[in-house]
Amino acid sequence: MDAEAQLRFWGRASGVRASILRIPGIYAADREGGTPRARLVKAVPVLRAEDDVYTNHIHADDLARACCRALWRGASQRVYNINDDSGLKMGDYFDLAADLYGLPRPPRIARDSASEQLPLMLLSFMNESRRMDNTRMKRELGLRLRYPTVRTGLQDAR
């Protein structure tokens, strides 16, 4: 938030139009680690449904298109959430991917035992739960997503 505030201040003070893009989990088959396949093969656990958190995603191609749109159409000092329409919880995301790839679904664990089984970086994602709204991205940037859901993006990545 501090970085966003500084960028907005700089934009106002200098007269430069600066758009801020908030970007969640980026995925694409042509990126190293760009899909959940490796994590599923390793059977890395996810939180059980009652402890699970929301996660947001954007396909790398849609992100690139959003960046170009923001350069040309982004409003001055405006914040845009750049995410797809999925609105999935993290465990549901990995279950969906496992089903699409024909792999076993990941094991589910309780939040209180997650710190014993998961790396700190992964735990940090599980401590935040946000549902991003992309209405402004669509309306103001005029972006129509090529991959409007994780399902469509992962199906194309198979």
Image (cartoon, helix red, strand yellow):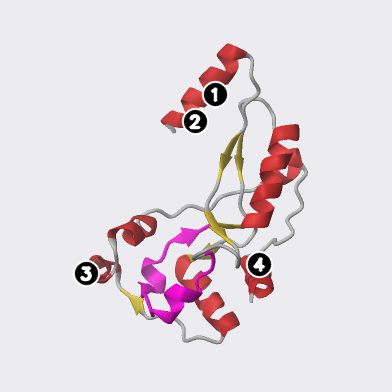
Percent from the top left, x then y, of residue 110?
30, 72
Is disc 3 placed on a helix, strand or loop?
helix
Q: Are marks 2 and 1 in contact (CB under 8 Å)?
A: yes
**Residue, disc 1:** 8
Crowding at dot 2, Cα within 10 Å, few <14 / some 14-19 / many 20+, comes out as some
User: Can you say whether 26 is above or below 111 in the image?
Assistant: above
Which label number is shown at residue 116?
3
Q: CA distance from mark 1 to mark 3?
A: 41 Å
Q: CA distance from mark 2 to mark 4?
A: 29 Å
In terms of image quadrants, where is residue 42? Answer: bottom left
Q: Is residue 84 magenta?
A: no
Q: CA distance from mark 3 to mark 2?
A: 34 Å
Q: CA distance from mark 4 to mark 3?
A: 32 Å
**Residue, disc 4:** 153
Is disc 4 placed on a helix, strand or loop?
helix
Percent from the top left, x then y, of residue 100?
60, 81
| Residue type, label 3 | Glu
Is disc 2 placed on a helix, strand or loop?
helix
Q: Along the horizontal axis of the image, is 140 left or right of 126?
A: right
In which quadrant is the N terminus drawn? top left
| Residue type, label 1 | Arg
Q: How many marks?
A: 4
Q: Along the horizontal axis of the image, is 36 left or right of 156?
A: left
Is disc 1 placed on a helix, strand or loop?
helix
Q: Are marks 3 and 2 in contact (CB under 8 Å)?
A: no
Q: Magenta residues?
A: 34-56
Percent from the top left, x then y, of residue 155?
66, 74
- Tell me the residue at 68%/45% (across/down): 66
Q: Earlier in the sequence, mark 1 or mark 4?
A: 1
User: Can you say whether 16 is above or below 104 in the image?
Assistant: above
**Residue, disc 2:** 4
| Residue type, label 2 | Glu
